[in-house]
Image (cartoon, rainbow, N blue to C red):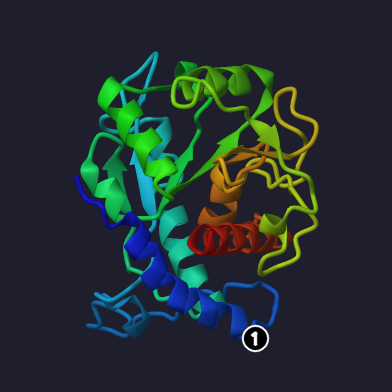
């Protein structure tokens, strides 16, 4: 089993420091459309592989209680457009170097220990994630060793219960706490004024979904108070990233999705 997680975080910290010192102009929109390729050009310069990139976006592939995770399932929603756009956003809005393409891994794959940031979404659908014993062991060790898991895009009481039932198996001894709006994770780079409800593409007026009324951000903390698992509840950052350039998706919500995502990333690299 790899033990590189903390060393990877320290290497990445060097670029994060540069990001914190670099001015960012909050233009509208924050992330401009990518330039068009010229005839015969297979790859844009900004898309060229950066083999020294410090940040890799790793999406977790998981099984659900009522359906498997192989092939397409809840884990794959918004993939790969959301992941690619977020990587472009991190590159454009900070000095953090990024890998050009997202990665998909299962939790029983020891490669997760190579990467300090994991992303899961739709964890309330189909009964919630089903974790095998090896996945439970790996995820628990990964988080206690310094890893960070961002959970996104699930709504309402029923989906919360499905999520909670699954993650109580990872940390039965730890509480799931609600983060206050003044927690540093909301202002470490951008001041986002706490949790924000970001809608799906089909809901541009941001009418609360299911029985959700407000966005809330919860967390599972380690013994030092570090956020190990960040739970973005009643909000959908992934749609904000995926539909950045869609004419029917409000720019203000796409911008907020990038601001929150960059905040969460920088927190994960510096704590």
Give the farthest residue toward the front: 223
Q: Quadrant of residue 217?
A: top right
Residue 43 position, x and y percent, is: 27, 78
**Image position of 107 with respect to 263: above or below:** above
Instruction: Mark 1: give few (<14), some (14-19) or many (20+) Cα within 10 Å.
Output: few
Residue 176 position, x and y percent, is: 63, 30
Q: Quadrant of residue 255?
A: bottom right
Residue placed at 40% from the left, 68% from the top?
10
Q: Is residue 139 among what the camera can see? A: yes
Residue 199 position, x and y percent, is: 68, 44
Q: Is 110 placed left or right of 201 in the picture?
A: left
Give the farthest residue toward the left: 1
Q: Is 94 placed left or right of 79 in the picture?
A: right
Query: Which corner quadrant holds the N terminus?
Result: top left
Residue 13 position, x and y percent, is: 46, 72
Callout 1: SS: loop
Give 231 or 141, whichever is nearer the viewer: 141
**Image position of 76 with respect to 12: above or below:** above
Residue placed at 50% from the left, 74% from the top?
16
**Image position of 121 with respect to 193: above or below:** above
Q: Is 58 placed left or right of 77 in the picture?
A: left
> Which residue position holds label 1?
23
Give 249 or 134, whichever is nearer the viewer: 134
Q: Quadrant of residue 188?
A: bottom right
Give 251 or 147, whichever is nearer the viewer: 147
Residue placed at 49% from the left, 26% from the top?
171
């Amino acid at each position: 089993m790899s033990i590189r997680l903390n060393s990877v975080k320290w290497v990445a910290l060097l670029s994060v420091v540069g990001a914190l010192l670099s001015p960012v102009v909050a233009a509208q929109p924050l992330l401009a459309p990518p330039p068009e390729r010229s005839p015969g050009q297979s790859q844009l310069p900004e898309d060229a592989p950066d083999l020294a990139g410090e940040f890799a976006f790793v999406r977790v592939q998981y099984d659900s209680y009522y359906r498997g995770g192989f092939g397409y399932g809840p884990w794959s929603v918004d993939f790969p457009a959301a992941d690619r756009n977020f990587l472009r956003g991190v590159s454009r809005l900070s000095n953090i170097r990024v890998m050009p393409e997202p990665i998909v891994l299962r939790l029983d794959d020891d490669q997760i220990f190579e990467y300090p940031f994991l992303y899961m979404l739709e964890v309330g659908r189909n009964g919630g994630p089903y974790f095998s014993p090896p996945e439970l062991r790996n995820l628990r060790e990964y988080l206690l060793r310094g890893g960070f898991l961002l959970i996104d895009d699930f709504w309402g009481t029923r989906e919360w219960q499905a999520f909670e039932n699954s993650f109580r198996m990872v940390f039965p001894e730890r509480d799931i706490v609600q983060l206050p709006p003044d927690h540093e994770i909301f202002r470490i780079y951008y001041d986002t004024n706490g949790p924000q409800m970001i809608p799906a593409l089909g809901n541009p007026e941001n009418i609360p979904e299911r029985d959700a009324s407000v966005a809330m951000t919860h967390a599972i903390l380690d013994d030092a108070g570090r956020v190990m698992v960040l739970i973005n509840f009643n909000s959908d950052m992934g749609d904000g990233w995926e539909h950045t350039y869609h004419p029917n998706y409000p720019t203000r919500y796409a911008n907020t999705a990038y601001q929150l995502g960059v905040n969460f990333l920088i927190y994960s690299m510096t704590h």
